[in-house]
Amino acid sequence: MVASDLLLNAVVAGVLLGGFYTAVSLGVSVAFGLLDVVNIAHPVFVILGSYLAYAMNVTLGLDPILTGLAFTPAFYALGVAVYRVYYASFEKTGQESLRGLVFFFGVLFIVEVGLLLQFGVDYRLVEAGYIGETLRLGPLSVALRLAVPCLVALALTAALAAVLHGTSYGRAIRAVAQDSFALRLMGVDPVRVKAFAFGLATATASLAGALLIMIGPVEPAMNREYIGRVFAIAVLGGMGSVGGTLAAAVILGVAESLTATFYGPSWALAVSFGILLLTLAVRPAGLFGQA
Amino acid sequence: MRRWAVPAGALALVTVGALLTRLVQNQYYYFAAYVILQYVVLATAWNILGGFAGYVNFGSAAFFALGAYTSVVLIKSVGAPLPVLLLAGGAVAGLLGLGLGYLTLRLRGVFFSIATLALAVVLQTMVVNWEYVGGARGAYVVRPRTGALFSSYVELLFVVMLALAAGSVTLAWWIQHSRVGRGLAAIRDNEEAAECMGVPTLRLKLLATTLSGGLMGLAGAPFPYYVTYMEPASAFNLDYAVNSLAMPMIGGTTTWLGPVLGAVLLGTAQQVATVTISSALNLLIVGVVLVLFVVLAPEGLVGLARRLAGRGG
């Protein structure tokens, strides 16, 4: 009986964790999956969002989710700026693959060390009234610090899906992924569309970062473990599909949660990277993509 | 004459370095020079795959650490001497490189790079969970007796690393000027076209990944004796991944000279900055310089020098 309770709780925690992983992965799913921009700096933008939430929480006592929402325009602007530099330096001349990757690696490094200099290597966390509670439903116990981020992440996912599938901007983004030349013939500037989409993708990092620091303490180097996770999810989810990203994130969340419960938390990370390696080697198109 | 200039120069440098240990007494110089030379090996190794063949490896730290931890296992289990450690570290990391080479069958471009990053994290998790080599806490490594030739063990390590650096640079120089290098360049420029022209792409890629990985493992093999306290965080440090890629990028990736220039300049600058400013700030400088170079001078220092020379005459 105890083992089945443990299993049930691990699965539920994994689903909630997976919901949160969606929020972190959406940006990469859009940038990498739809725009073909390998933004490996996205996780570090998420960590930046976490530290902003932390700073606002400590100095002004602001709610992390509110801070996350408030900073989305700033992150949008950051994303547009990064994309403009990327476009002018690499994409325009067709050098994006190798040097573009190194560019984002450098950006990752600068942000990480900047955070390190500003906040140090200590783990930081936020205070909010609703984080510490735990709901009990029979044998099931649901920690609100997991449930709240999951719900907010689902709302974010729904909002992004609405933008991508319900607006003309969203259709333009999905069109640029398929055929940017045809889009140009239709009188739309693909570079502007991509800048908008990249800004949108980066904006999700603000809220995702706020959710991250609600789930657990954060330190600057943490972005690296998320690189493998988010790319595993983006690839597994079939590159750029919002529904696929959600499904892949939940699969990964449950796999990690089960590993952490039955084998110890230090193995959990290896699971996501193992899944990533396996996916890349066996089915690069992902579970939900076209082969 | 020209054909022997680089190997002869490398041999001369090693001899001079070994003789220098008779003159210079300040141990700090050996500690600092060891790190810089280690970066020469890592940058050269990275460039054989990344610069010559165009496959970007983000997991240099994994190969380095694999070499280092192979040494830890051999020291703990049989007390193997340094030459054996070097051979074993290079061989094990070379095998991992060979495995990585087979991955290039399916993974090109960014997918390959992301896979190398994943590989590094998986390996680190395994080491952290492996109690025999100290796990997450780390383990002490006792240096063997120095012997008669050198007055301290660090001097011995310095000469060993100097020889490794000279050897790997000579190897890179040879590759660049041989059929192998031309084949790799063809793969870098257009892999499909190279395959169609009859370039044995798979064999060349396997050779490049094996050599690159093996050299990184060699660089890591003496590391336990250098630090004397091995922990996963220092062996898998992101510094290695960033520097082994930033140094060739800054020096220039298409020649054997680029990584050497980048490693010596950036490595020395970091050693000075670590002493005079702080180690976090010097990493920030590396990041900024890397981004600036990638954006403004994509050909690196070697390319800049060529452009200036071309304009002058």
Image (spheres, coloured by chain):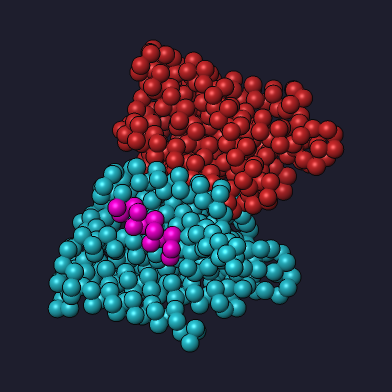
Residue at the location (53% across, 29% down)?
Answer: A205
Q: Residue furthest front?
A: B313
Q: Is residue A163 visible?
A: yes
**Quarter residue A182 falls in:** top right
Residue at the location (21% across, 69% down)?
Answer: B155
Observer-nearest of A64 and B13:
B13
Judged left or right of residue A27, residue B96 is left
Q: Is residue A257 above or below residue A290?
A: above
Q: How many marks?
A: 0
Judged left or right of residue B162, residue B172 is right
Q: Position of residue A193 (x, y in %)?
A: 71, 32
Judged left or right of residue B76, residue A212 is right
Q: Position of residue B144 (x, y in %)?
A: 18, 69
Residue at the location (46% across, 24% down)?
Answer: A210
Q: Magenta segment: does it hold B261?
A: yes
- Highlighted magenta segment, given as a residue range: B260-272
Most frequent secondary structure within the magenta stretch:
helix
Observer-nearest of B251 and B241:
B251
Chain identifier matching the cyan colour in the rendered picture:
B
**Quarter residue B32 falls in:** bottom left
Q: Is residue A139 visible?
A: no
Q: Is residue B122 above or below residue A43?
A: below
Colour chain A is painted in = red
Residue at the location (53% across, 32% down)?
Answer: A24
Observer-nearest of A185 and A149:
A185
Q: Is residue B46 above or below residue B110?
A: below
Q: Magenta segment: does it hold A50?
A: no
**Quarter residue B165 falls in:** bottom left
- Quadrant where the C terminus of chain B sits is bottom right
Q: Position of residue A133 (x, y in %)?
A: 39, 15
Q: Position of residue A143 (x, y in %)?
A: 42, 21
